Image: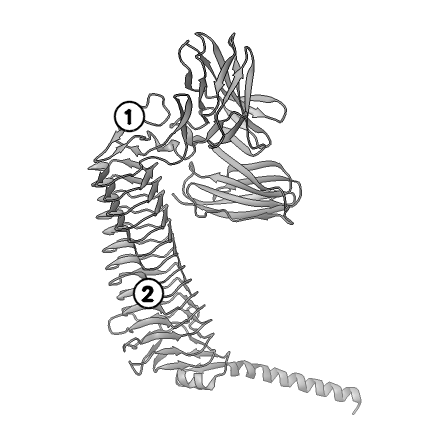
């Protein structure tokens, strides 16, 4: 035989051998269990398998306890409705995972598991395991088909994934304990257990989109040193005690969860601190959100309405918490601070139409309460008893007044629906105190729509304007006969202001001596292009009367724009026949009208770095996110570029232009104020040179 023929025959032989060997290799890695299969029990297949093999359990009922000692994938032929595994011995786990990287079930190919009813026995049990996946299994479903624990992870069972499982009629649906950390629980349903999902001494776990309903006690419980867990978009409803319960567990994040129609509390924090609750809904419970001996927590944009007793309840030694932008309406009490709850800050909350009081303080002191909307509460909008040193107004400089030769701060208080005082100057700050039940607010705000967008500019003796900053010493500037003086913003090219013609400016001018009767002064708002003042918007004229030294007035409502690339500027021109000294210091505000303050957009950018030029373009995630109402967007430009930064709604419509112009290389930060926008998802897009990037932001009110 020729050499080439021999080579061809050998090659064909090898090829034929491969054709037969390859499917045999696949079959060797896939073990089948069931009637008519090679293995009649799952345990027999586990014994015969090697690491990495797949065991497919065909439809049927299996009565055994399975010890899994190899890294296997075990799944059913066609899902939990057709494949049941019950414990042969109730005093042992049904599936006992004794090694890492085991998968039990897969999408639509899990098991129905029951019968492990002995002490601390589970349908699926992981002891100190990692890298395991438990998916689409049904661990207990009625009173005769259940386990003590549906799924049980303990003793540092870390980095496992539990997805799409159901666990009902057990003592515990899903239980993690003893430093079982960094696990991911997604889309599981736990119902009709004593406890739904229970974490004990376990941290850094992520719970997303799980449902915990109709459990006898808590839906989701974090107990004792369960720190830094993240709970997002879970539903905990109609449980016999609390929807979500945290005890002695700190630094957790709860976002977008629904905890409603529970017999006691929607969300309950006891002896738990430094947690963040954002955008959760806790309605139709006895109490919406309950804090007990819990401090330094942040509650933002949550809804706690239609609860039988309390919307948000701080009970005993809850100190230094911050409540911002929450809604507590149509409860019996809106927001209730009871006994030794001190140094909390309540701002921008809405407590309306409650059956008793909007905000109630009892034996709680040194709290700061401002910019809250309190109206339509049956017994009264606010009530205090046995308290001291609470501040019912803003600690932030908002409004300035000239008195006794120097400017001083005034503050914004709360909005009261039954406020009967006057607001003679129309600045949104009442001229008389609000007298509530046991409390007095000397700074009642007439309309909260003016709160968040009010921007004050401080006129200083150095001829500059400083944004809401009283650190510059006041002085005086002499305006000569026929002369003028210009104040320019301290930050060049960093302000983009768009004020429609429906808005106006207010300000105060204080003279060291009263202008003579008939002597007038023109005030113009505009911008400085680096060389010249360009009047661009509302102006006003004030006229002396021979005795008045302080003039507070509102400009006309001309449309006004300062584009980024120019300075904000203000000019006062002396139209009189004499020279006058004008006291510097005090505010100019372009958000003075409570009726129109929400009809314009303000964006302020800060170039935070002029050195350490970035090496590449970058658009970063906004912070905070979710936000209400303000968030910041940072980005980086490596070379001088034409830059646009815009915000769009879900329909792709542009809703805000944060920057449009040329940029030097550097790191920048833009501020987006969503006060006038509705809650929802928005997108922001950066275009710089040939670079384009889009990211998502979430506004929650």
> In the rendered view, would you say 448 is above or below 631?
above
Q: Is residue 167 visible?
A: yes
Q: From the top left corner, tell me how far across and down residue 422 is, in percent.
A: 29, 23
> In the rendered view, would you say 363 is above or below 450?
below
- Secondary structure beneath label 2: strand
Identify which residue is drawn at 48% across, 25% down. Answer: 474
**In terms of depth relative to the viewer, which is nearer, 648 or 360?**
360
Residue 483 lies left or right of residue 239; in this view the side is right
Residue 478 lies left or right of residue 98; in this view the side is right
Quarter of the image for residue 138 reads bottom left
Label at residue 432: 1
The image quadrant where one finds the C terminus is top left
**In terms of depth relative to the viewer, which is nearer, 36 or 156?**
156
Identify which residue is drawn at 30% across, 42% down. Answer: 366
Q: Which residue is mark 2?
A: 198
Quarter of the image for residue 171 reads bottom left
- Secondary structure beneath label 1: loop
Label at residue 699: none
Mark 2 packing: few (<14 Cα in 10 Å), some, or many (20+)? many
């Amino acid at each position: 035989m020729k050499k080439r023929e021999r080579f061809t025959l050998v090659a064909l032989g090898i090829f034929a051998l491969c054709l037969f060997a390859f499917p045999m290799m696949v079959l060797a890695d896939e073990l089948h269990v069931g009637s008519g299969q090679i293995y009649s029990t799952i345990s027999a297949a586990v014994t015969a398998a090697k690491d990495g093999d797949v065991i497919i359990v065909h439809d049927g009922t299996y009565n055994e306890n399975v010890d899994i000692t190899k890294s296997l994938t075990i799944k059913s032929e066609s899902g939990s409705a057709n494949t049941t595994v019950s414990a042969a011995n109730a005093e042992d786990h049904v599936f006992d995972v004794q090694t890492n990287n085991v998968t039990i079930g897969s999408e639509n190919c899990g098991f129905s598991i029951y019968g492990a009813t002995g002490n601390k026995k589970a349908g699926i049990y992981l002891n100190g395991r990692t890298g395991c996946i438990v998916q689409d299994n049904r661990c207990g479903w009625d009173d005769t088909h259940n386990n003590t624990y549906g799924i049980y992870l303990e003793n540092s069972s870390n980095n496992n994934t539990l997805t799409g499982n159901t666990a009902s009629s057990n003592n515990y649906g899903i239980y993690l304990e003893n430093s079982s950390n960094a696990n991911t629980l997604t889309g599981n349903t736990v119902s009709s257990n004593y406890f739904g999902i229970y974490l004990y001494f376990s941290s850094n776990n992520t719970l997303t989109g799980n449902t915990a309903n109709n459990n006898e006690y808590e839906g989701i419980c974090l107990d004792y040193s369960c720190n830094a867990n993240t709970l997002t978009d879970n539903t905990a409803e109609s449980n016999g005690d609390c929807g979500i319960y945290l005890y002695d567990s700190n630094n957790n994040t709860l976002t977008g969860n629904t905890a409603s129609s529970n017999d006691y509390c929607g969300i309950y924090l006891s002896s738990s601190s430094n947690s963040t609750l954002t955008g959760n809904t806790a309605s139709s419970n006895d109490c919406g959100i309950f804090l007990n001996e819990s401090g330094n927590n942040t509650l933002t944009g949550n809804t706690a309405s239609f609860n039988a007793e309390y919307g948000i309840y701080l009970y005993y030694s809850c100190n230094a918490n911050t409540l911002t932008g929450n809604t507590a309406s149509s409860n019996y009490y809106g927001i209730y601070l009871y006994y030794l709850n001190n140094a909390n800050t309540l701002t921008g909350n809405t407590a309306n139409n409650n059956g008793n009081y909007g905000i109630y303080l009892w034996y709680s002191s040194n709290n700061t309460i401002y910019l809250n909307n309190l109206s339509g509460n049956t017994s009264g909008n606010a009530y205090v008893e046995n308290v001291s040193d609470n501040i019912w107004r803003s600690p932030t400089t908002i409004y300035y007044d000239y008195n006794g030769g120097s400017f001083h701060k005034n503050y914004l208080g709360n909005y009261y629906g039954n406020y009967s005082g006057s607001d003679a100057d129309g600045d949104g700050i009442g001229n008389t105190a609000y007298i509530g039940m046991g409390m007095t607010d000397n700074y009642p705000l007439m309309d909260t729509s003016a709160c968040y967008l009010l921007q004050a500019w401080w006129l200083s003796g150095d001829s500059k304007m400083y944004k809401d900053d009283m650190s510059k010493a006041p002085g005086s500037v002499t305006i000569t006969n026929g002369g003028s003086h210009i104040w320019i913003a301290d930050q060049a090219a960093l302000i983009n202001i768009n004020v429609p013609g429906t808005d106006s400016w207010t300000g105060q001018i204080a003279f060291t001596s009263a202008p003579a009767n008939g002597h007038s002064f023109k005030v113009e708002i505009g911008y400085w292009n680096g060389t010249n003042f360009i009047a661009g918007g509302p102006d006003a004229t004030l006229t002396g009367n021979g005795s008045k030294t302080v003039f507070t007035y509102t400009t006309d409502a001309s449309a006004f724009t300062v584009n980024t690339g120019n300075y904000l500027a203000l000019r006062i021109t002396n139209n009189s026949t004499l020279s006058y000294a004008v006291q510097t210091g005090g505010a100019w505000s372009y958000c003075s009208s409570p009726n129109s303050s929400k009809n314009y957009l303000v964006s302020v950018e800060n170039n935070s770095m002029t050195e350490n030029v970035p090496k590449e373009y970058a658009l970063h995630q906004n912070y905070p996110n979710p936000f209400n109402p303000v968030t910041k967007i940072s980005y980086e430009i490596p070379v001088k570029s034409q830059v646009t930064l815009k915000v769009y709604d879900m329909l792709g419509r542009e809703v805000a232009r944060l920057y449009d112009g040329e940029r030097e290389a550097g790191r920048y930060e833009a501020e987006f104020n969503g006060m006038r926008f509705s809650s929802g998802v928005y997108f922001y897009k950066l275009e710089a040179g040939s670079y384009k990037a889009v990211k998502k932001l979430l506004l929650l009110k």
